[in-house]
Image (cartoon, rainbow, N blue to C red):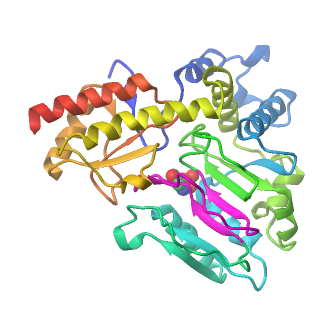
Amino acid sequence: MEKRIINFNPGPAALPLPVLEQIRDEFLNYKGTGMSIIETSHRSREFENVLNDAIERTKRLLGLGEDFHVLFIQGGASLQFCMIPMNLAIEGRPVDYINTGTWSTKAIKEAEIQKKDVRVIASSEDENFSYIPKNFTVDEDASYLHFTSNNTIKGTQWSKFPEAGDVPLVCDMSSDIMSRPFNPEPFGLIYAGAQKNIGPSGSALVIIRKDMLERVPKDLPTMLKYTTYVDKNSLFNTPACFVIYVISLVLKWLEESIGGLEQMEKINREKAKLIYDYIDSTEFYRGTARKDSRSMMNITFRLPSEEIEKRFVEEALKEGLGGLKGHRSVGGCRASIYNAIGVDEVKTLVEFMAEFERRAG
Ligand SMILES: *Cc1c(COP(=O)(O)O)cnc(C)c1O
């Protein structure tokens, strides 16, 4: 393929073109150092500036007060499934989870492996995770309440976060971090694998409220406790330098070109509405998530048959629209429209959907 495609991949996913261009332009000689940023010591002033820039931008964009630490931890979101119960479960108090799909299920499993007192206080498994549960009560004795803000595979998203009183919320925001503003105060910990909305794969962004650190057991292995990353500003060992560098550029783009998260949310809403409105206007495409639970990031839909779905994905790619195949566990189609995908690119997809329907419908 000569040209770049419009990239609807679920993750690793599209990054803003100006960011890729900047990476290319300064790749061989970073800011006059005579070397690439990926050849530079993680203890150098250049890299520490990059790291601190990524941290400061995260704090500004999310409106985090002094009571939060921003960390970068390798092992992706999946290592956080394990580190959270290990570090944050309080002896004698249960850990509560809401199960809204594949990723929540994996998070629950990691707490169970560690023999924590796991309670699943709500689940949408009864309807193939097609909705976000509404009616549940949070017990005040829980160590924390874990949920997944956006379900990348099933295409559902919390529009309003659960309320848990004094129980700290712990949230996997891998696929919608930085897509909209929210109040960070109720959160004890927020984590996100970088490769959906903020950078390449290789690191998780972890935001931890300072009072959570008192819970971290002293006898945990060094690399598995949050206090190590806090004490050393994520530089206990060599971090994912390239990933953090790209994250800093993506966040700069978000702040300076987009204008922050309120603006980003507006654009994301407009994009999602274009596709959902089209889906709702025809019988040919069928959204799989319940309307009140639809994701603004991952739009899951079916066509009349698997045969037609296969053709849709193939013909879309010929037209320069990539990554529209649904997750292997659920089939169908999925358009992941993370921050880096623009309104015009979504319009091109909707035009293709209409044109394909005329031919195949
Ligand atoms: C992709 C994804 C994960 C897995 O992330 P890794 O970084 O590959 O471990 C976890 N949770 C959600 C919501 C995801 O979208």
What residue sits 34% from the left and 26% below the top?
Answer: 347
Q: Is residue 342 depicted above or below 333 in this figure?
A: above
Q: Quadrant of residue 359?
A: top left
Determine if residue 34 is in view: no
Q: Quadrant of the N terminus?
A: top left
Q: Quadrant of residue 75?
A: bottom right
Horizontal side of residue 258 vs 209, given as left or right: left
What residue sits 86% from the left and 62% below the top?
Answer: 211
Which image quadrant shows ligand 1? bottom right
Q: Is residue 36 depicted above or below 222 in this figure?
A: above
Residue 350 percent across, percent down from the top left? 29, 31
Q: Nearer the viewer, residue 10 or 40?
A: 10
Magenta-colored stretch includes residue 150: yes
Residue 312 percent across, percent down from the top left? 20, 39
Q: Is residue 262 depicted above or below 190 in this figure?
A: above
Residue 58 percent across, percent down from the top left? 73, 38
Magenta-colored stretch includes residue 193: no
Residue 164 percent across, percent down from the top left? 68, 67
Q: Quadrant of the C terminus?
A: top left
Q: Which residues are magenta?
A: 144-173
Q: Nearer the viewer, residue 243 or 41?
A: 243
- Dominant secondary structure of the residues highlighted in magenta in the image: loop
What residue sits 65% from the left and 79% below the top?
Answer: 114
Q: Nearer the viewer, residue 108 or 114?
A: 108
Q: Nearer the viewer, residue 143 or 137?
A: 137
